[in-house]
Image (cartoon, rainbow, N blue to C red):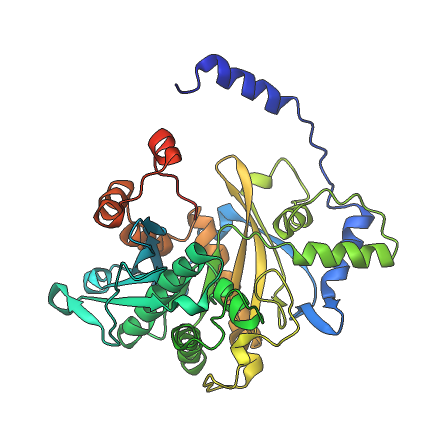
């Protein structure tokens, strides 16, 4: 039985009874809170630091969209996933399919695909093929590989780590594969963060439950992202990570602590960093808000890479990895932008590399490009193309799962397949 209209009406009534208090950006306390973002520390480590003078600014979408795109070609990459599949034979599998797109369209580029199947086997009832070589298909336009995670590496987080290996390996390998064909005068957009942050957390954490710190495959994936950074630093080609759903909380946590120390008695009604920035970036005028893009200056996150700070340094600077540039050039940098979206407002996190944005002109060019893209569409056009190409549809997921999945459960029988990622 599904929800009837009478049920939906009641749920709507419940939602309408909740009162929301708007936090005004122009209040003195909000200005004081924004000033705290000049530098945030956790113990002796810098978690957030302004890369330039602090500011909040806005642009009119109606004027911005009439400007000319200063980049003649834009590239984007994305990957689709089946999400982890559990088989009664005792293994988790996740298949990820990476693709890239360009504007103007390049059909040969769009045709290229990278498929990675990552697996974790609990017992001896299933054997995954081991090979260090890639297999090609579709007349060389596609390549595939199986990755096995050694049983000794994991005691917990089986599904998530299998997913991380598959998606980060497929994404990074595909970007490296197409680099020789892209024009360095263009602009590159990655879907999501510029680094594999969830994997980096476990590489940097001294855990007895997830022991991927010295795993050769995990190290290779992280090296891939450094190699991607090297290409862009060497060619001075702009690259961003377009994070559509930033969910970190650490900046908010530290702001709360610092505000308390400085006796800024604001009612912190936010649960995430995104909600904090959404309030900080609220346009001055409610009447014209739908026509405004509001954004911050650029920030650095030298000792933070997955919603936490740990006692070790970032895995990006491990001695086992090779770097072409000073290690500080690999520091993640970002700015936040608030944009109208289907009657509401969303906040996007735009990530890049300190080695690029430390140059003022490059920093301005990347900012202008992002604002232009958001003025002509809700999401950058090329990113939508890449998502469309890489996405594994529901019907395809079902067919793939049926090839591997034997285990039935009460929830699946009752509710059907539920995606968790």
Say whether residue 295 is left or right of residue 226: right
Q: Position of residue 350 (x, y in %)?
A: 52, 60
User: Looking at this view, is 252 or 64 the one in front?
Assistant: 252
User: Looking at this view, is 164 or 276 the one in front?
Assistant: 164
Say whether residue 168 is left or right of residue 305: left
Q: Quadrant of the N terminus?
A: top left
**Residue occupying image coordinates x 84% and y 54%:** 260
Say whether residue 248 is left or right of residue 94: right
Q: Is residue 271 visible?
A: yes
* Residue furthest out toward the left: 139
Q: Position of residue 153 (x, y in %)?
A: 45, 68
Say whether residue 178 is left or right of residue 226: left
Location of residue 186 by image quarter: bottom left
Q: Position of residue 304 (x, y in %)?
A: 61, 67
> In this rendering, is residue 110 above or below 84?
below
* Label tally: 0
User: Looking at this view, is 418 or 121 the one in front?
Assistant: 121
**Residue occupying image coordinates x 37% and y 61%:** 167
* Residue furthest out toward the right: 263
* Residue furthest out toward the front: 124
Q: Is residue 67 visible?
A: no
Q: Position of residue 107 (x, y in %)?
A: 19, 60
**Residue occupying image coordinates x 71% and y 73%:** 45
**Residue occupying image coordinates x 33% and y 50%:** 85
């Amino acid at each position: 039985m599904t929800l009837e209209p009478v049920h939906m009406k009641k749920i709507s009534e419940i939602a309408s009874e909740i009162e929301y208090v708007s936090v005004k950006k122009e209040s003195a306390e909000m200005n004081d809170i924004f000033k705290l973002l000049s530098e945030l520390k956790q113990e002796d480590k810098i978690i957030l630091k302004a890369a330039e003078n602090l500011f909040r600014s806005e642009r009119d979408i109606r004027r911005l969209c009439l400007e000319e795109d200063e980049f003649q070609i834009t590239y984007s990459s994305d990957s689709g996933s089946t999400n982890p599949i559990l088989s009664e034979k005792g293994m988790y599998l996740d298949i990820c399919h990476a693709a890239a797109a360009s504007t103007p369209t390049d059909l040969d580029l769009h045709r290229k695909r990278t498929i990675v199947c990552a697996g974790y086997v609990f017992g001896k009832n299933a054997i995954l093929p081991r090979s260090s070589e890639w297999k090609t298909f579709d007349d060389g336009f596609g390549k595939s590989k199986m990755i096995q995670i050694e049983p000794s590496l994991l005691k917990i987080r089986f599904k998530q780590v299998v997913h991380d290996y598959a998606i980060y390996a497929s994404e990074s390998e595909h970007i490296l594969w197409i680099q020789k064909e892209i024009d360095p005068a263009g602009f590159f957009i990655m879907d999501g963060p510029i680094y594999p942050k969830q994997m980096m957390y476990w590489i940097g954490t001294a855990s007895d439950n997830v022991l991927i710190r010295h795993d050769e495959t995990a190290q290779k994936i992280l090296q891939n992202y450094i190699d991607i950074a090297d290409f862009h630093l060497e060619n001075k080609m702009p690259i961003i990570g377009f994070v559509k759903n930033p969910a970190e909380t650490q900046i908010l946590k530290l702001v709360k602590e610092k505000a308390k120390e400085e006796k800024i008695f604001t009612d912190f009604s936010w649960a995430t960093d995104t909600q904090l920035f959404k309030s900080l970036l609220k346009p001055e005028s409610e009447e014209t808000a739908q026509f405004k893009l509001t954004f911050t200056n650029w920030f650095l996150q030298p000792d933070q890479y997955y919603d936490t700070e740990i006692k070790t340094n970032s895995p990006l600077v491990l001695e086992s990895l090779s770097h072409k540039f000073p290690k500080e050039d690999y520091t993640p940098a970002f700015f936040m932008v608030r944009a109208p979206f289907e009657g509401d407002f969303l906040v996007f996190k735009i990530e890049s590399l300190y080695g690029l944005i430390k140059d003022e002109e490059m920093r301005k060019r990347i900012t202008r490009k992002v604002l232009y893209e958001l003025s002509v569409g809700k999401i950058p056009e090329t990113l939508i193309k890449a998502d469309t190409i890489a996405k594994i549809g529901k019907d395809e997921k079902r067919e793939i799962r049926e090839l591997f999945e034997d285990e039935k459960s009460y929830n699946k029988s009752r509710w059907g397949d539920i995606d968790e990622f």
